[in-house]
Image: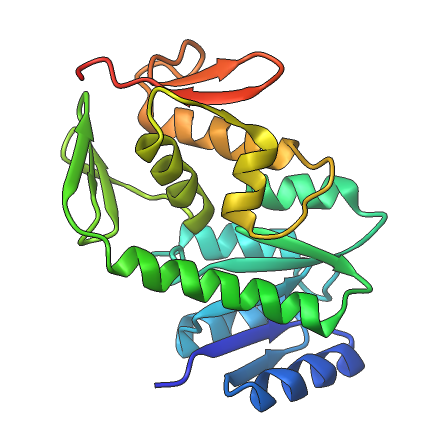
């Protein structure tokens, strides 16, 4: 079955360009030109990935992202947000609301395709993982691609799951921010270490008993982060 990609953007020439290249690469596409229609299509089409513009009529991309993440039908779909270079605050807000990635306009089709393929490749490799890892009352089930805390499912975005995974698999080691950016995002993310910080904060809020005083996900000031397995 072909992967389906939902494009939500009100600029018809951009939608046409993206659709043409995606279909030539073997993907199926669905398109929406405003936030309301995009939200509806996301729930009915159940795409593999959503390309979501920030500036949209009827409902802006940040609000769409928030709605997607709060719905059981769409909360697990990776979202790549499309932003203008001047919209720095929107990039951070998008990550805060649960977007997995963003790309700034104008962008090259080659770069966009590389990011889409990276998301699909990571998803496929994670599906092949097996075994279970636990710490405190948190359990990572690699077969199910699922994290639970106190026997309750924890909803993680794709990037949050990947970040937790790499920290756990390198437990005891200090992971530099730029290394985490390169390994998880898969491309040069110049100077955007806040991207890692935002996702770390989300992980702590979801997994630590007291996210203001984290026990497992430690900040190594000026360098990066380290996962501490206190039970090993």
Q: Residue furthest top?
A: 213
Q: Residue at x 80, y 47 (%)?
A: 87
| Residue 16 drawn at (x, y percent) | 72, 85
Does residue 128 sit above or below 165 in this rendering? below
Q: Residue furthest right?
A: 86
Name the residue: 37% across, 43% down: 161
Q: Is residue 106 left or right of residue 53?
A: right
The image shows residue 178 at horizontal and vertical percentages of 61, 34
Q: Residue 124 falls in which quadrant of the image?
A: bottom left
Between 137 and 225, the one nearer to me in the picture: 225
Q: Quadrant of residue 64?
A: bottom right
Looking at the image, residue 16 sits to the left or right of residue 37; the answer is right
Would you place residue 133 above or below residue 67 in this image? above
Q: In the depicted view, which residue is nearer to us: 138 or 231?
A: 231
Q: Position of residue 151 (x, y in %)?
A: 14, 34
Task: Work out whether residue 98 can be spotted.
Answer: no
């Amino acid at each position: 079955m072909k992967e389906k990609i939902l494009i939500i953007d009100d600029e018809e020439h951009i939608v046409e360009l993206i659709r043409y290249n995606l279909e030539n690469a073997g993907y199926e596409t669905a398109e929406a030109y405003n936030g309301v229609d995009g939200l509806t299509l996301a729930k009915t089409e159940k795409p593999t990935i959503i390309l979501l513009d920030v500036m949209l009529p009827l409902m802006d991309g940040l609000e769409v992202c928030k709605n997607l993440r709060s719905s059981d039908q769409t909360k697990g779909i990776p979202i790549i947000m499309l932003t203008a270079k001047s919209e720095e605050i929107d990039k951070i807000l998008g990550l805060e609301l649960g977007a997995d990635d963003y790309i700034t306009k104008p962008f090259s089709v080659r770069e966009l395709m590389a990011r889409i393929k990276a998301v699909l490749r990571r998803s496929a490799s994670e599906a092949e993982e097996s075994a279970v890892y636990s710490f405190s009352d948190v359990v990572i089930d690699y077969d199910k691609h699922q994290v639970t805390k106190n026997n309750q499912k924890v909803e993680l975005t794709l990037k949050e799951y990947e970040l937790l995974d790499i920290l756990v698999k390198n437990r005891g080691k200090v992971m530099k921010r730029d290394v985490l950016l390169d390994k998880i995002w898969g491309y040069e993310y110049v100077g955007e270490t806040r991207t890692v910080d935002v996702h770390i904060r989300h992980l702590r809020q979801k997994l630590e008993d007291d996210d203001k005083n984290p026990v497992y996900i430690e900040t190594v000031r000026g360098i990066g982060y380290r996962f501490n397995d206190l039970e090993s």
